[in-house]
């Protein structure tokens, strides 16, 4: 039995806790390992180690910290296949998808290879007579991260490379569902030259998270996960005086204008709604065709493609998408599909009858497509987080914009159109953090910042890019006036000797 422990002070560490959680293979429903769940005492031990390690690390010249990042990046590239295998085995996503996730995470490491430049301050000469002023960004101290199951490598990589490059020490509490890949990455980070204690992984559940939120030596918490937990983490962390960013749930709309190329729209929707079995916070879960004709055409083009999706285990090269993460997830998604039917939406493609020989107990669900969805239905309001796409027919562009702006989530959205004026108006007016035009999943690259609006993000900083640098540093501003110095009375020439 594979037992996943913690990674602390540069090595695998057992901790003192007695509780464990099962790790499953989502394709078979079998338990493949156990992860140890840290106690509050374990967390206190790890935070003390991180606090101690941060003192020397934070005092290193940024260029030295960057040198570790260059080596880390190289190791991640070289070990991508091994990491993808570890990741997919516990998560269930296809291997190409896992490799893509790791590649996007590596881009954040590449971004922070430039940390000396990113930390450059501001300087104003002569803010008053003979007075100068400058500002620098200094590390916070110990930063913690709490991350979700759906991107077990990439989402943590959004956080700790930036934080550590800024001079902090980091304590990561990954998802207990797929914890193995992060432990391996932590080993590679140390192989790259990171001093022990600067990056620590502590596995656990609510007990460990609460201990992080209450610990006085944790200066900031980055969270990515569901909205209910994110709001809790934001509230409790902030009440304890910490800086908190909590990136949360989503319900992303894709507006289809009558002038859009319908084949391109269908391709975009297949990838963005069903990729990774819909378990992405930037998945498109609502298509909003404008006008009945657009809607009819969209459903006609889309339905056969959804029905043709291949659902199979992660290592089957034919697989378009793997299983969902757990039995509870599958039951929750099936519950929503039933609610949608009872509320009167039309289930155009029903993926519930998928059966895979040899994988009868796996958490597989085929692609599902609903038409005639209405705004008051739970399948429209709630984040389903599965391979279920809803079509909500809007009668006008204005109705589409209002729908998006009235929704409680504000992570991502997209519009497909050939009209620049419509696209510009859309970008300007939607109350959403990340907007795509003829791009289905507008995930910002590493040197821009990722984050939603409304109940998709609590706190005021987005993640990675310059927002990540700001979140992980505090500003210090110095104002200087120098009295007349040695240049006034000093003699600089050689003494003549006479
Ligand atoms: P989750 O909220 O259940 O878990 C996230 C983390 O919180 C895990 O580490 C978990 O151990 C911890 N946690 C769970 N319950 C807790 C509790 N009661 N107290 C303290 N900590 C607790 O989320 P998940 O199911 O792992 O991930 C899916 C969710 O993450 C979806 O809602 C998805 O939209 C969201 N997500 C958002 C983004 C984004 O950038 N906005 C990115 C990826 C995923």
Image: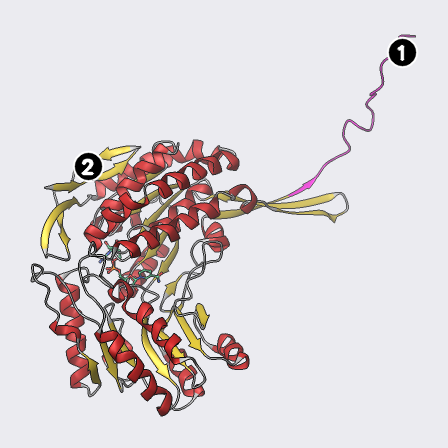
Magenta segment includes 488: yes
Residue 496 has which mark? 1
Badge 1 element: loop
Tell whether 103 sits left or right of 30: right
* Range of residues picked out in magenta: 479-498
* Along the viewing direction, whichever of 364 and 6 lies nearer the viewer: 364
Residue 136, image x, y percentages? 57, 44
Residue 487, image x, y percentages? 80, 28
Label 2, residues with CA under 10 Å away: few <14, some 14-19, many ≥20: many
Color style of the picture: secondary structure
- What residue sits 31% from the left and 39% below the top? 186
In the rendered image of this protein, does residue 150 appear above or below residue 251?
Answer: above
Q: Assign the C terminus to one quadrant of the image.
A: top right
Tell whether 236 sits left or right of 338: right
In the rendered image of this protein, does residue 200 appear above or below residue 373?
Answer: above
Q: Assign the N terminus to one quadrant of the image.
A: top left
Residue placed under numbered mark 2 in the picture: 15
In the rendered image of this protein, does residue 73 appear above or below residue 321?
Answer: above
* Along the viewing direction, whichever of 418 and 23 lies nearer the viewer: 418
Q: CA distance from mark 2 to mark 1?
A: 74 Å
In the rendered image of this protein, does residue 187 appear above or below residue 175?
Answer: above
Label 1, residues with CA under 10 Å away: few <14, some 14-19, many ≥20: few
* Along the viewing direction, whichever of 217 and 390 lies nearer the viewer: 390
Badge 2 element: loop
Residue 172, image x, y percentages? 31, 46
Predominant secondary structure, magenta span? loop
Which residue is farthest right? 498
* Along the viewing direction, whichever of 15 and 411 lies nearer the viewer: 411
């Amino acid at each position: 039995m594979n037992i996943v422990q913690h990674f602390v002070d540069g090595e695998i560490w057992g901790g003192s806790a007695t509780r464990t959680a099962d790790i499953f293979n989502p394709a078979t429903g079998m338990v493949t390992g156990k992860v140890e769940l840290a106690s509050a005492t374990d967390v206190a031990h790890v935070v003390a180690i991180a606090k101690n390690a941060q003192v020397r690390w934070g005092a290193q010249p940024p260029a030295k910290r960057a040198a570790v990042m260059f080596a880390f990046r190289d190791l991640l590239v070289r070990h991508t296949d091994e990491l993808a295998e570890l990741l997919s085995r516990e998560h269930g996503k296809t291997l190409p998808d896992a490799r893509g996730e790791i590649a996007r995470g590596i881009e954040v490491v590449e971004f922070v290879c430039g940390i000396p430049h990113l930390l450059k301050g501001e300087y104003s000469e002569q803010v008053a007579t003979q007075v100068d002023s400058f500002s620098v960004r200094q590390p916070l101290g110990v930063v913690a991260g709490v991350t979700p199951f759906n991107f077990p490598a990439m989402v943590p990589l959004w956080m700790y490379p930036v934080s550590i490059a800024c001079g902090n020490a980091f304590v990561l509490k990954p998802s207990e569902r797929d914890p193995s890949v992060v432990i391996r990455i932590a080993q590679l980070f140390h192989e790259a030259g990171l001093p022990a204690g600067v990056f620590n992984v502590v596995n656990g559940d609510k007990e460990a998270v609460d201990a992080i939120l209450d610990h006085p030596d944790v200066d900031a918490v980055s969270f990515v996960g569901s909205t209910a937990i994110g709001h809790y983490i934001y509230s409790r962390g902030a009440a304890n005086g910490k800086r908190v960013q909590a990136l949360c749930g989503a319900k992303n709309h894709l507006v289809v204008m009558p002038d859009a190329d319908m084949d391109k729209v269908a391709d975009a929707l297949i990838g963005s709604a069903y990729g990774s079995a819909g378990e992405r916070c930037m998945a498109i879960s609502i298509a909003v065709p404008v006008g009945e004709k657009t809607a009819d055409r969209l459903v006609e083009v889309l339905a056969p493609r959804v029905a043709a999706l291949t659902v199979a285990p992660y290592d089957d090269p034919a697989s378009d998408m793997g299983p969902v993460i757990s039995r509870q997830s599958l039951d929750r998604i099936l519950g929503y599909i039933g609610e949608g039917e009872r509320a009167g939406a039309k289930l155009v493609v029903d993926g519930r009858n998928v059966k895979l020989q040899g994988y009868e107990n796996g958490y597989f669900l085929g692609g599902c497509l609903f038409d005639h969805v209405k705004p008051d239905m739970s399948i429209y309001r709630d984040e389903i987080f599965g391979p279920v796409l809803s079509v909500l027919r809007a009668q006008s562009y204005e109705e589409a914009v209002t729908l998006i702006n009235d929704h409680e989530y504000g992570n991502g959205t997209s519009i497909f159109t050939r009209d620049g004026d419509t696209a510009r108006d859309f970008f300007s007016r939607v109350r959403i953090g990340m907007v795509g035009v003829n791009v289905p999943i507008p995930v910002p690259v590493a040197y821009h910042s990722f984050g939603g609006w409304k109940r998709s993000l609590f706190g005021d900083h987005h993640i990675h890019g310059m927002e990540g640098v700001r979140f992980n540093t505090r500003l210090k501003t110095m104002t200087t006036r120098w009295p007349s110095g040695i240049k006034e009375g000093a003699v600089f020439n050689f003494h003549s000797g006479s």
